[in-house]
Image (cartoon, grey):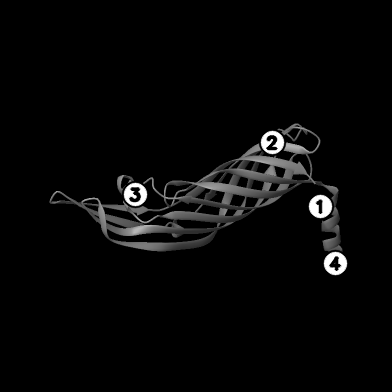
Amino acid sequence: MMFVFLLLFANLLISQIQLIHLGYGVEHDSYFADINHKIDLEYEVKFNRHFAVAAAASMSAGNLGWDIHKDYHHLLPKEYSRVAQVNAIMFWSPWRNNRINNFKIGLGVSAVHVRSKYIEYAELEKNVLVNYKDILFNEPGVYPIIAVENDIRINQKFLLGIKLQANFKGIESNPTLPQTFVIKTAGLTDSATQYRGSNFIGAAMIRLGFFL
């Protein structure tokens, strides 16, 4: 019985329109309020002019710096952020896929792994780093995802499009990651504390697609 089901499912996939999308863009990893470079590979199966399903894998990477200590960033050890994702999404084309332009909205689930190294504590005196502690932060999770895509067919084989997506995270997985900076200059001491956290990870990409 299982073999028959798998055979029917494989036949269904083969009989539908299949596409591969390659994407490049930027991702806002809001743990660290920074911009990562992102690459994305998506496999899509169109069942009709209204519905499609897709599976995607992506990775992004970037160095940190847009934060409370940006004026002293060049004096600190390098911080970075890495995000890996695997997504499963169902798409709906509200105005139908007319074979030339296809606007679609998708909902699904995303397995995400965030890996970052950030400065937990740093002490600077007269623009010299005298003490610091960094943290290697890892958080895996599975979250809902929403995606908006628009593809324009440029010939019989290729598509050109854009993709916007956001991973929404629950309150229970919203960490508090404090950063403390002590700055001593001209006999004065100033300190500041920053708390990092995240409720979503958003991305924007341009894509090249081709039919299988």
Q: Name the residue under label 1.
A: 13
Residue visible at 60% across and 48% down?
Answer: 39
Say whether disc 4 or disc 2 marks the residue closer to the N-terminus.
Answer: 4
Q: In this orientation, does residue 125 appear? A: yes
Q: Which of marks 4 and 1 is in front?
A: 1
Badge 3 element? helix
Q: Name the residue under label 2.
A: 160
Badge 1 element? helix
From the viewer's perspective, tell me whether residue 38 is left or right of residue 186: right
Q: Which of marks 3 and 2 is in front?
A: 3
Identify which amino acid the numbered label 1 is placed on: Leu
Identify which amino acid the numbered label 3 is placed on: His
The crowd level at tag 1 (other Cα within 10 Å; few <14, some 14-19, many 20+) is: few
Q: Nearer the viewer, mark 3 or mark 1?
A: 3
Badge 2 element? strand
Residue 73 location in percent, x, y?
34, 49
Q: Mark 3 points at which residue?
A: 73
Q: Would you say the residues marked 3 and 2 are in contact, meaning their CB atoms lie under 8 Å apart?
A: no
Q: Mark 4 points at which residue?
A: 3
Residue visible at 66% across and 36% down?
Answer: 161
Badge 4 element? helix
Say whether disc 4 or disc 1 marks the residue closer to the N-terminus.
Answer: 4
From the viewer's perspective, tell me whether residue 179 is left or right of residue 125: right
Give me the C-alpha separation between circle 3 and circle 2: 38 Å
The crowd level at tag 3 (other Cα within 10 Å; few <14, some 14-19, many 20+) is: some
Determine which of the numbered discs, if any, sits on residue 90 in the image.
none
Give me the C-alpha separation between circle 4 and circle 1: 15 Å
Residue visible at 75% across and 42% down?
Answer: 210
Q: Would you say the residues marked 4 and 1 are in contact, meaning their CB atoms lie under 8 Å apart?
A: no
Identify which amino acid the numbered label 4 is placed on: Phe
Give me the C-alpha separation between circle 2 and circle 1: 23 Å
